[in-house]
Image (cartoon, grey):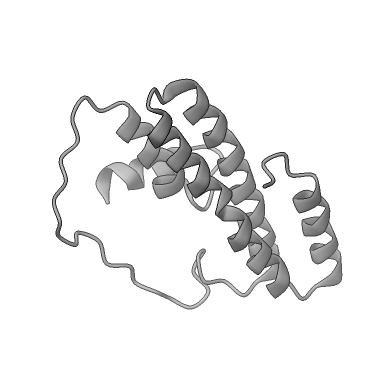
Amino acid sequence: MGLFYHLNYTNATRRFFDAYEEWTPRILLNCKKIYFYNKDFYMRRIREESIITTTNDEKRLKKILDMIEIANDMTKYIEVNCKSKRLRDTFKEYYKSFRAEYIKLFNEINEVDIKNKAKVIIENNVCRE
């Protein structure tokens, strides 16, 4: 977790999904060589009310904002910095898949004011399918 933790938590914006959805592709695109090792290195611990599993509507709204911002930023980054069309298309499809996740989060929001804010944000999202 060292490198990803450092990149994630020293970032001033403190997005929820930085380490994997934003930094990993940037790192991979700048590597000269990548090796594949088919073993599990990561085990996720699930805790109640963590950033990922929260039931707090304000945190859900923040997750939606972060996912949209990262998808938009990374789609632009990939377009400029990824030479391989196949890899570029794979990344683009991956970031498009965020839409299903933030729609799910939207549907879980109970507070009307927060749901209305989320609706406006999603409707104005420039990275729509």
Q: Nearer the viewer, residue 84 or 56?
A: 84
Residue 110 appears left or right of 45: right
Q: Is residue 122 left or right of residue 4?
A: right
Query: Is 113 placed above or below 76 here?
Result: below
Q: Quadrant of residue 69?
A: top right
Q: Position of residue 1 (x, y in %)?
A: 27, 51
Residue found at x 45% / y 47%:
21
Q: Quadrant of residue 111?
A: bottom right
35 vs 48, left or right, is left
Residue 38 placement (x, y as % from top left): 15, 56
User: Residue, x 70% and y 69% (percent of image)?
Assistant: 57
Foreground residue, 49 or 110? 110
Residue 118 at x, y = what percent? 77, 58
Query: Residue visible at 14% across and 60% down?
Result: 39
Question: Residue, x 33% and y 68% (percent of image)?
Answer: 44
- Disc tally is 0
Judged left or right of residue 46, residue 50 is right
Say if 104 sits above or below 1 in the image. Answer: below
The x and y percentages for residue 70 are 56, 42
